[in-house]
Amino acid sequence: MNDRYKSDEIILSFLVVDDDNTNRLILETMLRKLGHSVYSATNGKEAIESYETHRQDMILMDVMMPVMDGYQACMSIKKCYSDQFIPVIFITAISDDQSLSKCIECGGDDFLTKPFNNIILKAKINALSRTSMLYKIINQKNEEMRVIHSRLQHEHELAENIFSKINTPPSTESESIKYILSPQSISSGDILMYLDSNGHQYAMLGDFTGHGLSAAIGAIPTTDIFYKLARRNYRIDVIAMEISQKLNEVLPTGLYCAACIIDIDNNDGTLSILNAGIPDALLLLRNASDLQKFKSSNLPLGIKGSQNSGFEIATTKITDDGSLYIYSDGVTEATNTENIMLGQEILEQLILSSRGPESFEKLTRRIEEFRSSDEQDDDITIAEILIKKPSNTTRRNHSSFSSNWKIELHFDNEALKKDKPTGVIINTIRQHIDSTNITHNNNLLTIISELLNNEIDHGILRLESSLKDGKDGFDIYRKERNKKLAGIVDQYIDITISIISSNTGNILTVLLSSSSEANYPEVDSIDVDPLKPYGRGLFIIKQLCESFSFDNDNKSVSLVYKW
């Protein structure tokens, strides 16, 4: 419709179609007096040709005409331009109901009876003009929605591309894990990660609230932190804390990640599970008659304050071969054709009945048979992690080791750049101690990792913890750390570790020195600021150790831990 105005009325272009010259002239005159422009035609065929050329705003169409009548012309125009509203007013002297009904059936919008009344003509034009304007607005809004939908479709495809790369890393192609990832729509909110690292099997299942880019934004740092810390054999509560802190920074309010993080320590036969909002993890050992359940005991990751209260870990000894099952709530909430939910109880029965060879294939097939539909209300993710009972060669008793031992390690530039010291030292210690005491194993890992991180970050790299302040602080800190670590020259760390074992206990002594010229703080001054989410490393070491001291003259640290 032309955007032209005269006074408060819209100026329109009209097509007057009538084989009677007098009627046509009268209508043309009346319309021009109202300020409108007028085109004319003498039959239906001319009307179609004129409309194709000029696309008038409104048509006044006679019914009975030679060559092609008004009914046919109206139907042809309406059919060719079905995506538009083209007002057609039939001009007729016919007054019987059947004829008027036919006008409506062929696409007419109103009638104008002969002889013509100027007031009625103007009222009908104004009414149809308003209707036409509404159609135009609706079409404009529909086009805007089409553009928005196209953009959202592109974003969903982008998110799906990100998730497909995150969820199929090379590390998941392991004989120790089998899984299915079935997104509800084009993009998923579930992620699954797995890594073999220094005798440990690490796994994480994450279920983000929402889908698309919002979930992808959280998935990217989650996978990065998980793999980085798992390769360095960090405790799973530390991994959870780092991920939660990051998600709290990057995710919008109301979005979070329910997660289950697994550490299978094949060195000492220990299974550790941190469940934060995921359905029960289920352990089925080969000769067990029932499932062992690991319920959620933590807030999901990314909820404000969840990382400040610490994370609870459930642990158990691996006494036999078996399988560990982790899954998202899309599995237990899956419904069949009768809208009956699978539920926790049925899932557990399916796991028990599927045990034996190809257990995972049997289980997933039975889940699909229950659902009997391609429709999903949520993402469906389930994984089976195979667990092996440690053999005598991998699981050692305290009596099989020397009661006293000492080792000296030197880490040069390249070793420091690759962040190797922590993993190397922890694995070395585990080979020389009774590793069945889970609490002290965790304490030793904490002491060594915090000691080395402090020496590297604040000694060699001279980083300030205050960089972590603010919303993006941890991200800024990591970027600066990576940048400085990549550029170190002629830096090193020397560490001497000794353990003395006796019937009354064990004593671990650590002496660390480095190329750092930074001064250490006074031990008595080490404390924690409860308002800051960092600065706890040295305080934790101080609390765990029998003795802890710095020597600024010789640039060294020494500590003693007893158990």
Image (cartoon, helix red, strand yellow):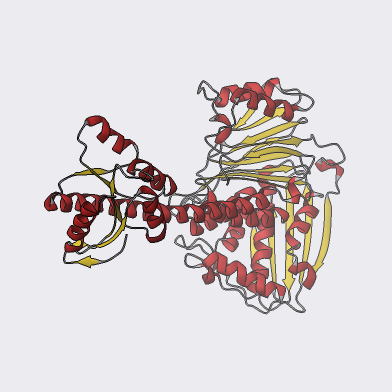
Image quadrant in which you'd find residue 179? top right
Left or right: where 191 falls relative to 249: right
Q: How many marks?
A: 0
Q: Is residue 67 above or below residue 242?
A: above
Left/right of residue 533 with respect to residue 353 in the rendered view: left
Q: Is residue 13 visible?
A: yes
> Residue 538 appears at what percent x and percent y?
59, 63
Residue 256 relative to residue 41: left or right = right
The quadrant in which residue 269 appears is top right
Near-viewer residue (502 or 33): 33
Q: Give coordinates of residue 119: x percent, y percent.
A: 12, 52
Residue drawn at x 21%, y 31% is 96
Location of residue 168 in the rendering, given as x and y in whole percent from the top left corner: 70, 48
Residue 471, how many percent across, how many down? 47, 64
Q: Is residue 352 above or below residue 325?
A: above
Q: Visible in this render: residue 412?
A: no
Q: Quadrant of the N terminus?
A: bottom left
At 29% from the left edge and 38% from the top edge, which residue is drawn? Answer: 103
